[in-house]
Amino acid sequence: MDKNEFVTRTEQIKTRLYRTAFLYLGSENMALDAVDESIYRGLLSVKKLRQPEYFETWITRILINECKKELRRRKREQPLDTIPETAEEMFDSLSLKEALSRLPQVLKEIIILRYFTGFTLAETAISLEIPQGTVVTRQRRALSLLKLELSEEE
Amino acid sequence: MNRKQEYQDLLAELENTPSELEYTVARAQARAKKAQSIRKFFFMPASRVAVIFIAFVVMVNLSTTFAMACERIPVLRELAAAVSFSSSLSTAVDNEYVQTIGLEQTENEITMRVEYVIVDQKQLNIFYTLQSQEYFDMDATPDIFNSDGRGLNSYSISANGYNSDNGELRQFVVDFVDNDMPDSLILKCRVHDNRNLEMSEPVSVGDEPQELGAPEAISTFAFTLNFDPEYTQQGEVISLNQAIVLDEQNLTVTTVEIYPTHIRVNFIADEKNTKWLKSLSFYFINEKGNRFDKISDGITATGCVDSPMMASHRLESSFFYKSNSLTMFITEVVWLEKDMERVQIYLANGVADKLPEGVELEQATRKSNSWELTFSAIEREENALYQLFGTTYYDEDGNEYSYNSWTTYLTDYFDEAIGKYVETPGVFRIQFALKDYHYDTVYLTPSYSRLVKLEIPVEVKVK
């Protein structure tokens, strides 16, 4: 893929990238920084993307890594306030937005990619570098904790 | 408000983006023009074990004696957390069985510090940290050498603590099968950073498992570790030579080796046996009622060079319990029947001649010059996955091939054909590819054929 195509396609999906980063990080400024950094890093390495059909999962993977780096930095400063999976009832009393933000990260990222970024199972698996079976298992678990019933189309 | 409505509202809320997003691509283009540094790209290991760290915390918090030990030796507090998944190593720390090393080196903005070792005659646990202001996602690949720089034989080395933060205690485990621990050795480490992971080539859907290349090292360290002989001499070998019968097969328990880090129980088998011993469920109990179970992490058994038998099986250590009496109880045994050392798979028809108990061939798909195989198997315990086949396979003429990677996954999957999730509780799947394999038939090498629960546990007096 050349840089012109990269620019065109990134312009088309930048809102979706921001949405993903915002749900990962929960902050407008941090999400914007993560998107900026990801696009910059993508631009530097775009020549290595030989299969343009994977552009979206590839740039999303870059974004996820940026978000995770930020979360690690933040964890060092103040521990993250996630609720363990075993404390199911605690999720019931929270709003969806709050419950999502407090899901364990491995579950939260599945919901973000599947239902807010709009990725398929396969795209989610590629983006997170995990088997599709794992995506399915985590998705079911996360939806169950959130008490959210969504079909494949939603 | 119901959850679906909340979901729709949240989607709508996320449509409101900050105005700065408008120029994000332009900002990236401007920065890229200024960038002068050359970046290097590499792959990273796929395994990441964040889940383990949750177990660490829970177990440390639950252990009173452990917490007391940590109070006595504040410096060992983080070590206690690092070893809490292992009852043997936790007990070792509880008994202050730790040698402080305190060696530090810095290269290319990365500082590696070897803090402690827990070492005995057969096993070495190295605890170290990586620190950097420049890198935040580092991992180290270890290797060991004799103190004169020559290579060592017959050992395994593994690394725990992938995805650790800067300064967090990490661990290497070196395990000698036959040889004893040397008085000193050289630990060499190649440290890489994972932050360029995203630069790797994407893996397409449905591709066979990819083998990952070695990441490029930023820093290379070499530490000479000298061990206190007080630690490396620790271990007790009890000769038993007691014959036992398990499921009509004759075995002899030859020796029991008790080290601070683990127990080894060694067997030989009667040549007339029709099955190879592959795995055991067993435990020791001492006169105080303390129970020592199968090893919780790391190597559980080691095999023979000349047969499929697993001859040495491991338990958590009883070393620090000063037991006057120890009794072994064997409750389950996993066999490989000798006539199942190789099983024939008719790839073109997708059927198998004979498979291990509970294993089914789900799919055999030809992909250009290769075959991709999917098997399902019944979980022996919840979330416990195990290997179904050895990595060596054969064609009809007996020519040998091997595969180096496979994918294992649990339970449910989405069936694209029917558009639904298929639930298969208690089942896991394993998938691997026979690369550049043109034939329609293959012989696989099962790791086991049958598990037998013993109605009455077999009891052996160890001491």
Image (cartoon, coloured by chain):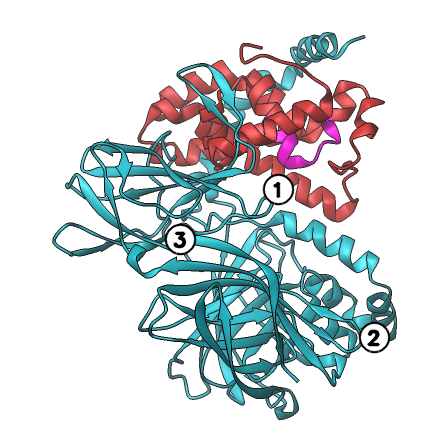
Q: Nearer the viewer, residue B370 or A10?
A: B370
- Is disc 1 in contact with disc 3, using a CB cutoff of under 8 Å? no
Q: Nearer the viewer, mark 1 or mark 2?
A: 2
Q: Nearer the viewer, mark 1 or mark 3?
A: 3
Palette colour of chain A: red
Give x and y (percent) for residue B254.
50, 83
Tell me the chain of label 1.
Answer: A
Residue tagged 1: A69
Residue A10 lies, with reference to residue B67, above or below; the image says: above
- Is disc 1 in contact with disc 2, using a CB cutoff of under 8 Å? no
Which is the main secondary structure of the residues drawn in magenta?
Answer: helix
Q: Which mark is residue B449?
A: 3
Q: Nearer the viewer, mark 2 or mark 3?
A: 3
Q: Residue at x 87, y 75 (%)?
A: B72
Residue B152 lies, with reference to residue B168, above or below; the image says: below
Question: What kind of element bears circle 3?
Answer: loop
Q: Which residues are magenta?
A: A100-110
Tell me the chain of label 2.
Answer: B
Q: Which mark is residue B73?
A: 2
Q: Amino acid at mark 1?
A: Lys
